[in-house]
Amino acid sequence: MATDIDPIGPCGPAINAPTSGSSARAESDRRPHAVIIGSGFGGLAAALRLLARGFRVTVLERLDRPGGRGRVFKQDGYTFDAGPTIITAPFLLHELWELFGRRLEDDVTLKALNPFYKIRFADGDEMAFSDDPEAMRREVMRVAPDDLGGYERFFKSSEEIFRYGFMKLGFQPFSTLGSMAKATPKLLKLGAYWSVYQYISRYVKSEKLRIAMSFHPLFIGGNPFSVTSTYCLINFMEREWGVHFVMGGTGALVDAMVKLIREEGGSLHFDSEVARIRLDGKKANGVVLASGEEIDADLVVSNADMAWTYRKLLPENAKGRWTGRKSVKSRYSMGLFIWYFGTNRRYDHVAHHSILLGPRYKGLLVDIFKKKKLAADFSLYLYRPTATDPSLAPEGGDAFYALSPVPNLLGDTDWTEQAETYRQGIADYLEETLMPGLQDAVVTERVQTPLDFRDQLLSYHGAGFGLEPVIHQSAWFRPHNKSEDFENLYLVGAGTHPGAGVPGVICSARILDDVVPDPTFFLREKAAS
């Protein structure tokens, strides 16, 4: 089977560490220097926000292409988004372009999807979810007619959760315990002590509807039976702004952000692994690359995995809240198994996004999150971007990925032995239920397991989304955007507040506007020293 992999990706050749010429130019640039570790969406958004505020910005990426979990694979004429596939809060992207008086739509084409996705239950029944209230009422009436009133009451309550939990708390830092104490009464009033599944079950009785309305936390690494009901905000977010696809794939958005950073004077360097964050006492003042090169910085922003940042990138003698047992003992999200495959025929009856549910819901999630046991059954997220953009596959073909939540590496699954068996099980299921003739139609493929998340993305325990977003690991209880223990060190991405998902990590960069002082602060500090 063909597996000709493009090692460069859509952003052109990898750019290595700064040359002597670029170092000389940096010496003459007196703007405070922000070094950003990692080029995921959080790191790229942080670079844009800091550039707009007057910092000199350098982004360092250990891989040969940008994007982190949002990077792209090109293989045998097929384009595969590695991870994120949907945009649910496009205004956050518009804001980044508007910082420079520019328009997102000049560089990126977003296409609203309707329906957002189709959910296929184990018995073959399907529900299509969209932002059309009348269409949704008809779907609910067909599947669970007695629950229509409860369904509509739920959406009214989820709007209130959304307005407070996302539009207010998602944009503010939780740097002090006082900020958490201030938010707690309102969160309790909104029922944050319920799990997502429990909260939804108060409104609807149909198990199908409970499942269809509660699976969303899995998009950000959370178990619907344990994460706080605050994450019911995702349901209303989809209705508020819709679900969008980036034409060209999510990688096209990564490319556009990279282009904007460069055009606005920032620099990005690939194949540039940061081995250590340099400290002067408790103050970050630069980084040391794996090559041995040192880069001075006035502030360091880490978009690397949170546990990797605190346990591996800081000097061994650095002591802080997250450098020791706390990061070890924290609860981490599930792992992900992803099968990317291209077919030489089209499956036009398959939706852009499909949620394919197995025979078990709660029991499967117990196996994944608590027992850390790889089960024989599974549920899948099936992504077919060529339903909307045929250019991502050769003419007459389709590009797919099938994603299955699995235990992280705290379980005992040997993925070097199990990966092919698990992939074959997914292929058999898809062929039997939704995609006849699939296995003869597959012409290119690859897989990612939690081992790849650990080894390529340096994700602790191979977790797909970092910390699990349970209530005692959210807001103030999560690693802060401004490091609690080290000056001039900041965090963005899934491991910090507000959490995983494209909106969450872009919001984490937005919070830098509140916690990073103005450039004049760093200039005064440098002058005083």
Image (spheres, rainbow, N blue to C red):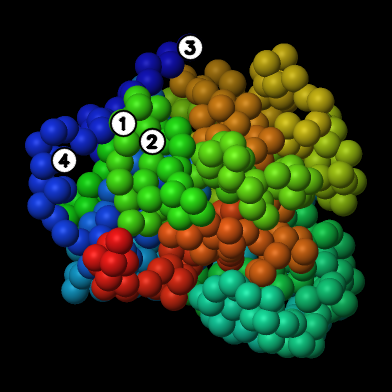
First-in-chain label (1 vs 4): 4
Q: Nearer the viewer, residue 478 or 126?
A: 478
Measure the C-alpha gap from mark 4 to mark 3.
46 Å
Residue 23, disc: 4
As shown in the figure, which amino acid type bears the numbered disc 3?
Met
Residue at left 74%, top 50%? 326
As shown in the figure, which amino acid type bears the numbered disc 2?
Val
Say if residue 357 shows up in the picture. no
Measure the C-alpha gap from mark 3 to mark 1.
41 Å
Tell which tag, 4 or 3, sits nearer the viewer. Answer: 4
Tell which tag, 2 or 3, sits nearer the viewer. Answer: 2
As shown in the figure, which amino acid type bears the numbered disc 1?
Glu
Residue at left 46%, top 55%? 283
Residue at left 59%, top 78%? 169
Measure the C-alpha gap from mark 4 to mark 2.
15 Å
Residue 293, disc: 1
Cβ–Cβ below 8 Å for labels 4 and 2?
no
Measure the C-alpha gap from mark 2 to mark 3.
41 Å
Residue 337, disc: none
Look at the numbered disc 4 and give the secondary structure of its residue: helix
